[in-house]
Image (spheres, rainbow, N blue to C red):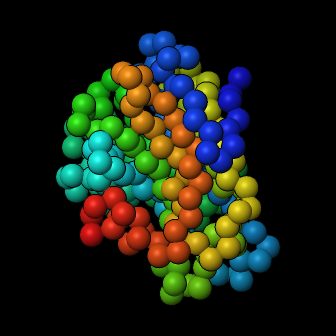
């Protein structure tokens, strides 16, 4: 049974699931009734960072135009341009056993494509979540529902996988950014 997290909670991933290596991170969302009727295109992005919290190689910024990190241990499954339907809108596969030792943290974000041009923000997004699933047996291990805590933000860091004493843990972050993907890229050392 999945562990449901609240914002700010941290949980062991590999310590409580010995032998866990291959996971996928599912991200999902809907637009709500106040969306203004315009088409939304939300995107997931992944920042594979060093101990200082910075991406030291552009290949370690994973998104729909760069679908895997430097050694293929983090792989984006592709862009869903509409978010239609139930279940995960986008997924990222992670092989924890192959993540390079130089990567201490893997941060997962959702951004709104062309948010400023379309006058869109996360106040118009509902039912956003991130979940971690054991790829081997399909069991959902962790789930974090973001809730409706956002208004003018155009990007959200939803959660982070990070190393701690040789084990992988997950942190439910839920931090919003007003300046979209550009703001995230800058904070993670890419701009």
Q: Residue furthest top?
A: 18
Does residue 149 sit above or below 93 in this rendering?
A: below
| Residue at the spot 53% in from the left edge and 46% down from the top edge | 159
Q: Residue 63, percent across and down?
A: 37, 56
Please tell me which residue is depicted at 53% across the width and 74% down the height of the picture: 178
Residue 134 shows up from this direction = no
Circle count: 0
- Quarter location, residue 151: bottom right
Quarter of the picture containing the N terminus is: top right
Q: Nearer the viewer, residue 47 or 135?
A: 47
Report x, y in % for residue 33: 79, 73
Q: Quadrant of residue 75?
A: top left
Does residue 38 appear to the left or right of 109 in the view shown?
right
Q: Quadrant of the C terminus?
A: bottom left
Image-based side of 93 in relation to 36, left or right? left
> Residue 103: in sight, yes or no?
yes
Q: Percent from the top left, x then y, of residue 95? A: 37, 29
8 relative to 61 in the view: left or right: right
The residue lying at 24 percent from left, 33 percent from top is: 100
Residue plotted at (68% across, 30% down)? 3
Note whether 81 is above or below 121 in the view shown.
above
Q: Nearer the viewer, residue 38 or 123?
A: 123
In this rendering, would 30 be left or right of 81? right
Which quadrant holds residue 93? top left
Task: Please state the horizontal and vertical placement of residue 47, each as a whole percent of the image.
Answer: 36, 51
Above or below, 39 against 118 in this view is: above
User: Residue 28 versus residue 161: which sits nearer the camera?
Assistant: 161
């Amino acid at each position: 049974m999945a562990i449901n997290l609240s914002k700010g909670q941290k949980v062991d991933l590999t310590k409580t699931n010995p032998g866990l290596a291959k996971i996928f991170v599912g991200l999902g969302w809907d637009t709500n009734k106040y969306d203004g009727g315009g088409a939304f295109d939300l995107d997931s992005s992944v920042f594979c960072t060093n101990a200082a919290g910075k991406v030291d190689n552009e290949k370690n910024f994973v998104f729909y135009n760069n679908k895997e990190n430097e050694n293929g241990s983090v792989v984006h499954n592709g862009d869903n341009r509409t978010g239609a339907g139930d279940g995960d809108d986008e997924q990222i596969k992670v092989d924890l056993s192959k993540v390079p030792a130089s990567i201490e943290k893997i941060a997962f974000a959702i951004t709104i494509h062309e948010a400023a041009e379309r006058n869109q923000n996360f106040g118009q997004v509902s039912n956003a979540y991130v979940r971690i699933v054991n790829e081997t047996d399909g069991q959902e291990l962790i789930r974090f529902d973001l809730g409706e805590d956002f208004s003018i933000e155009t990007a959200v860091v939803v959660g982070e996988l990070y190393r701690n004493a040789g084990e992988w843990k997950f942190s439910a972050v839920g931090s919003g950014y007003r300046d979209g993907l550009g703001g995230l890229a800058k904070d993670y050392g890419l701009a």
